[in-house]
Image (cartoon, helix red, strand yellow):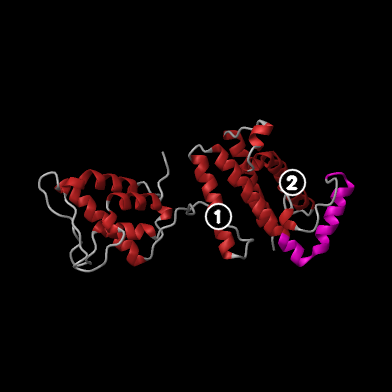
């Protein structure tokens, strides 16, 4: 099933009921909808019902308004089968049409959310960055549920890279000599042909993985899983999948998600 997000429903409302977008909460600004629009309204509430609950993030008042508007619209549709009347406002509430109230509430909702089951990232002190990563983790799992193998693979790989880069910066800030010693060891044993340099932002997932393993941040088993997912992470670059004849499938998606889960577990266990 196609994933429905709040902005999509807002776009449908704006297309069918353009007056809702700019309606003012005044008696002069009222507009009425009759049963000639019952099919359109039925489609709008059907789309609303498909929005994942984790995306309906609103304050108490806005959420109440949202539910009042949806109930008012839903109650009108079967009643219109027997008689025609105008849907203009919710009595005792405001001058706004329930369609406008629905639109305004959904316009405040995000198109990306965090599933309840999404793992926490206790080792990340930056709340905003942690929330953004959890959104990516949630999106990767949702993509997997939807059978979107390439999206799952790339999102999971990118999140692994972001987590390893974050913890590497933490090490650099606390004891930069550890990173230098690790690089020297990996060059000496032939893992790296040369030093990746001091600019962490330019390090590839390969470099991050090998240094994190050498420093004991992640287990060798986790590194193995990441190495499997690494080539598929590179599919984000145009032309790579064509040049290397790489195709994402359920197996690549599972490997990438497994690498992500192992990375989070290892880093969580090894963080102070």
Q: Is residue 34 magenta?
A: no
The part of the image, by quadrant, that contains residue 190 is top right
The quadrant of the rendering that contains the N terminus is top left
* Residue that mark 1 sits on: 134
Q: Which mark is residue 206?
A: 2
Q: Is residue 140 visible?
A: yes
Q: 109 and 61: which one is in front?
A: 109
Q: Is residue 191 above or below residue 116?
A: above
Marks 2 and 1 sit apart, C-alpha to C-alpha, by 22 Å
Could you tell me which secondary element the residue under label 2 belongs to? helix
Specify the segment rendered in magenta.
169-191
The quadrant of the rendering that contains the C terminus is bottom right
Spot occupied by residue 244 in the image (x, y as percentages of width and height): 68, 33
Spot occupied by residue 119 in the image (x, y as percentages of width and height): 56, 53
Q: Label 2: how many residues lie within 10 Å, few (<14), some (14-19) or many (20+)? A: some
Specify whether 237 is left or right of 49. right
Could you tell me which secondary element the residue under label 1 belongs to? helix
Q: Label 1: how many residues lie within 10 Å, few (<14), some (14-19) or many (20+)? A: many
In the displayed orientation, state which residue is furthest to the right: 188
Q: Is residue 189 magenta?
A: yes
What residue sits 19% from the left and 53% below the top? 33
Instruction: From the image, state whether disc 2 or disc 1 is nearer to you.
Output: 2
Q: Is residue 265 visible?
A: no
């Amino acid at each position: 099933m196609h994933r429905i997000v709040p902005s999509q429903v807002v776009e449908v409302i704006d297309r069918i009921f353009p007056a809702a977008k700019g309606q003012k909460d005044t008696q002069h600004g009222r507009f009425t909808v009759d049963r000639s629009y019952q099919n359109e309204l039925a489609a709008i509430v059907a789309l609303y019902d498909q929005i994942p609950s984790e995306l309906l993030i609103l304050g108490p008042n806005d959420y109440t308004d949202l539910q009042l508007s949806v109930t008012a619209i839903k109650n009108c549709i079967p009643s219109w089968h027997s008689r025609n009347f105008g849907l203009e406002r919710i009595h005792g509430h405001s001058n706004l049409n329930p369609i406008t109230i629905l639109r305004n509430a959904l316009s405040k909702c995000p198109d990306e959310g965090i599933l309840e089951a999404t793992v926490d990232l206790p080792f990340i002190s930056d709340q905003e960055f942690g929330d953004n990563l959890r959104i990516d983790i949630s999106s990767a799992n949702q993509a997997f549920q939807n059978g979107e193998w390439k999206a799952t693979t790339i999102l999971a790989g990118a999140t692994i890279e972001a987590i390893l880069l974050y913890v590497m910066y933490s090490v650099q800030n606390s004891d930069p000599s550890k990173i230098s010693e690790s690089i020297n060891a990996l060059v000496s044993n032939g893992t790296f042909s040369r030093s990746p340099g001091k600019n962490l932002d330019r390090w590839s997932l390969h470099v991050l993985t090998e240094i994190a393993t050498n420093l004991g941040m992640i287990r060798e088993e986790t590194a193995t899983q990441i190495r499997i997912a690494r080539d598929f992470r590179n599919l984000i670059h145009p032309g790579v999948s064509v040049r290397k004849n790489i195709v994402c499938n359920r197996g690549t998606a599972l490997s990438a998600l497994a690498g992500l889960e192992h990375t989070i577990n290892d880093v969580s266990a090894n963080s102070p």
